[in-house]
């Protein structure tokens, strides 16, 4: 299983704001994928789940599912910075439905 270390994550606020300002957005039913070019040769991911989505248990579950998707499907991500923003519909998704939606989204965003 590939590792999800610090080099594969967006961690600082300035990194998230750079992706938001320079990135291309793709609106899906339950997620928004923002992709911005990066100087690095590997993909990095940031996960945003606001309090509007649900309580902390639900938000953490969605984040765990998204991290697991990134670990298992890292080859689908091009070398760029990604921010995946969960919408309120993500609460109802299981892992398989989440994977299907994100795979389709990543193919569309390029």
Image (tube, helix red, strand yellow):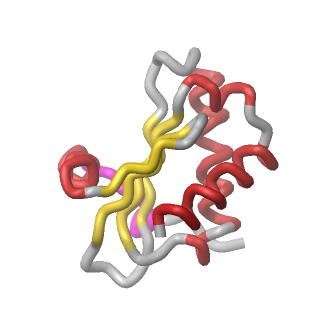
Q: Nearer the viewer, residue 70 or 103?
A: 103
Q: Image quadrant of residue 30?
A: top right
For image coordinates 37% across by 84% down, the residue present is 41
Residue 87 drawn above or below residue 74:
above
For image coordinates 54% across by 21% down, the residue present is 53
Residue 15 drawn above or below residue 107:
above
For image coordinates 29% across by 70% down, the residue present is 37
Region rendered in magenta: 6-12
Q: Left or right of 84: which side holds 74?
A: right
Q: Image quadrant of residue 72?
A: bottom right
The answer to whether residue 10 is magenta is yes
The answer to whether residue 55 is magenta is no
Percent coordinates x, y for residue 19 in the rendering: 27, 54
User: Furthest-front residue in view?
Assistant: 108
Percent coordinates x, y for residue 108 in the rendering: 53, 62
Q: Nearer the viewer, residue 15 or 34?
A: 34
């Amino acid at each position: 299983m590939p590792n999800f270390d610090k080099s594969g994550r967006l961690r600082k606020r300035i990194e998230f704001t750079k992706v938001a300002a320079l990135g291309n957005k793709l609106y899906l039913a339950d997620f928004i994928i923002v992709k911005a070019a990066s100087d690095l040769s590997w993909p990095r991911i940031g996960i945003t789940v606001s309090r509007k989505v649900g309580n902390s248990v639900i938000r953490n579950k969605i984040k765990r599912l998204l991290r697991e998707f990134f670990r298992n499907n890292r080859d689908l991500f091009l070398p760029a910075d990604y921010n995946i923003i969960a919408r309120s519909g993500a609460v109802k998704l299981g892992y398989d439905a989440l994977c299907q939606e994100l795979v389709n989204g990543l193919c569309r965003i390029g």
